[in-house]
């Protein structure tokens, strides 16, 4: 998954912000709990007002991600 997320981060620089959260890290567990991360990977998309607009637990292909960005970037 890392290469896909790396590509997303690079290709969408300036359009969206990618935040990586290692939910296994003790320092991040509380934030992971607050946003409802129960398994990894979990992708959560927020709009500009910090409203959650999409969530997916499990793998997500680059094509699927691109389609989501197109859908929510209208």
Image (cartoon, rainbow, N blue to C red):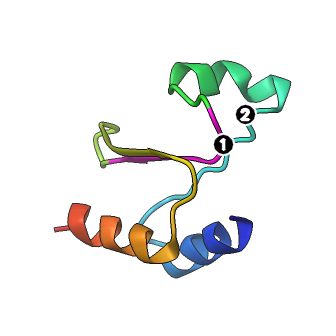
| Residue 18 at x, y percent in the picture | 56, 58
Q: Residue at x 32, y 64 (%)?
A: 68
Q: Do callouts 2 and 1 mark residues in contact (Cβ within 8 Å)? A: yes
- Sequence-earlier tag: 2 or 1: 2
Q: Quadrant of residue 6?
A: bottom right
- The span shown in magenta is 39-46
Please, is residue 51 above or below residue 70 in the view?
Answer: above
Residue with the mark numbered 1: 40
Furthest residue in direction front, as rendered: 58
Discs 2/1, front: 1
Q: Which residue is mark 2?
A: 23
Q: Cα distance, mark 2 to mark 1?
A: 8 Å
- In which quadrant will I find the N terminus? bottom right
Give me the disc on residue 8: none
> Callout 2: helix, strand or loop?
loop
Pointer 2: residues within 10 angstroms few (<14), some, or many (20+)?
some
Number of marks drawn? 2
Front residue (pair 37, 15):
37
């Amino acid at each position: 998954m890392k290469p896909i997320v790396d590509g997303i981060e690079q290709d969408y620089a300036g359009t969206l912000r990618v935040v990586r959260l290692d939910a296994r890290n003790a320092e991040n567990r509380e934030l992971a709990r607050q946003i409802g991360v129960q398994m990894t990977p979990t992708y959560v998309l927020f709009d500009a007002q910090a409203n959650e607009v999409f969530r997916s637990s499990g793998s997500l292909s680059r094509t699927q991600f691109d389609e989501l960005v197109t859908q929510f970037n209208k």
